[in-house]
Image (cartoon, rainbow, N blue to C red):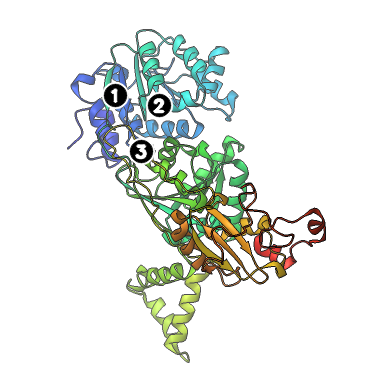
Amino acid sequence: MPFPATHPALAAALAARGYEEPTPVQAAVLQPEAAGRDLLVSAQTGSGKTVAYGLAAAPTLLGEAERLPRATSPLALVIAPTRELAVQVHRELAWLYAEAGARIVACIGGMDVRREARALEGGCHIVVGTPGRLCDHLSRGRLDMAAIRVVVLDEADEMLDLGFRDELDQILGAVPAERRTLLFSATIAREIAALARKFQRDALRIDTVSGTRQHADIEYRAVLAAPHEAEQAVVNVLRWFESPTAMVFCATREMVRHMHGSLAERGFESVALSGELSQAERTRALDALRSGAARVCVATDVAARGIDLPDLGLVVHAALPADSATLLHRSGRTGRAGRKGTCVLVVPQLRRRKAEQLLIGARVQAHWSGAPTADEIRARDGERLLADPMLTEEPTSDELTLARSLLAGREPEEVAAALVRLYRTRLPEPEEIRAMAVVPERRPAQTSYAGQAERPVRERVPHAVHGGAAGTWFGMPIGRRDKADPKWLVPLICRLGGVTKRDIGAIRIADGETRFEIATGVAERFAACIAATDDDEVRIAAAAAPPGSPAGPTSRPPGHGGHGPGGAPGGATGRRGPAERRRTAPAPQSSRKRAS
């Protein structure tokens, strides 16, 4: 549908930007019942909220006038939780109100406070800022609130999460009581409702999230990786999708530094974004992404809100988010304003259940797979090369002349091979990574999403298999002659098979081999993982139960306690007397390397 009637100056700005129809939140704030009222709006990230509250505030700020009056004391105040969001809001409102003659000042932590003070002293119509910097200007008498007609709280839930409640109380307590308060939030939780009751009057509730599927324009994927190959999986995901712009989320600043350095070393044009950077450094990083000078942004959750990057088609969770809300905030950097996007969670094997719980809590479904292998990526590169527009574009006369010179004295296949080499040299090399088989978890069906998401019911895996509970037996060609010991065998089994020590039952160590039990509930997944191990790894295969099982003497993994009966020193039990333990040499270097 076309845009509802709005102020002519703003309508001209929208037309110049190519806006033909409003998003749901923009249409809702322009309805007649919203005119002149306080608004309590819930809308997901990337839904066009900034333009929405810019349009909603226009009748109050402009009235019937064609342009805003001479800039003196500010008429509108926009409060944003993060520097990046404040910068984006300032940029959006600048073009939206350009025809109306608006002067907009940004007050953002990390920027030159003296320059901001001079700008406020010179007069403005709209102030956009972060809570801490606004309070600083207010307490020093630089920010005059007497003429404020409209206050906007953008991402109010994030401001409360970041602990800005006291700052909001100070700022909103200083603005005139006769004002409009527009509160925008991704969710309307109890704290947001209490904030609305305190600072709004008869607010109109607008909900553009309820009843819609979370992030309908985002395709979710979960990539299963061996614990020691998570970084390589991130590299291969970036290479597989080859998005013009991608964002990789990490859990800590240190992880950001490491991942950024690793990607840069591999040839990715990347920038880092975290809280330890100055505002100028963060601005330069974002400018590099917007200009195309960089393709990958490695960031902490400080960048999870408020950043709108062109052509951001891929979000990679290199570290699983802390909760489902953070998952949605991170993922919402892509799939914005009707554009399609892809979100990939890199899931270490042992954290699969955590990832499933995050997806259930976020009410999104993901396609599970292993990480793309190097061979798969090279095959896809070939498909991209064959589909490259440079092969279909009409060549110029100069290009044809040079092409004939290249073909003179050379076979066509040689020239084509050179073209392939040139194409590949600009691409980072994919990582050789273990092919992971994704075996469905044996668990009850996931809950419906009609109401509050239920907690998934975990199928109980035996802590240890003993007595009459038989598991599935596997074996490896390492025994007492190799100084086999459960202390390093158990971590090795867990790493190669993607299990925990709770899934390992009895361990029987013979002279030339070791057999061990895996709980039946995870045996199929364990078999799929060991089938994909590299040739230079210890080979594990299914095996028959050793004689006397399950009641025979066994050696328990560390921490399981002595469930099995005692045995002779140095026997298959692994329970030796003090003298035998003193005589036992450590595992040979080759075996230790396998367990590392």
State the residue position of label 2.
Answer: 154
In the image, taking residue 491 as reference, residue 351 lies left or right, namely left
State the residue position of label 3.
Answer: 46
Q: Which residue occupies the extreme top position in the image?
A: 177
Asked whether 200 or 463 is in front, the reply is: 463
Mark 2 and mark 1: Cα distance apart in space: 13 Å
Tell me where residue 251 appears, x and y as whole percent: 55, 42
Tell me where residue 357 appears, x and y as whole percent: 42, 41
Q: Earlier in the sequence, mark 3 or mark 2?
A: 3
Q: Earlier in the sequence, mark 3 or mark 1?
A: 3
In the image, taking residue 542 as reference, residue 67 lies left or right, namely left
Q: Which residue occupies the extreme bottom position in the image?
A: 409
Classed neighbour count for the residue bearing mark 2: other residues with Cα under 10 Å, few (<14), some (14–19), many (≥20): many
Q: Amino acid at mark 2?
A: Asp
Classed neighbour count for the residue bearing mark 3: other residues with Cα under 10 Å, few (<14), some (14–19), many (≥20): many
Looking at the rendered structure, the number of numbered marks drawn on it comes to 3
When the figure is inspected, residue 251 is found, relative to residue 118, above or below; the finding is below
Residue 212, by quadrant, is top left
Q: Amino acid at mark 1?
A: Ala
Q: Which mark is residue 56?
A: 1
Asked whether 347 or 595 is in front, the reply is: 595
**For the point 50% across and 57% down, which residue is it?**
225
Residue 47, by quadrant, is top left
Q: Earlier in the sequence, mark 2 or mark 1?
A: 1
Regarding mark 3 in the picture, which secondary structure is present there?
loop
Regarding mark 1 in the picture, which secondary structure is present there?
helix
**For the point 53% across and 54% down, which residue is it?**
499
In the image, taking residue 370 as reference, residue 108 lies left or right, namely right
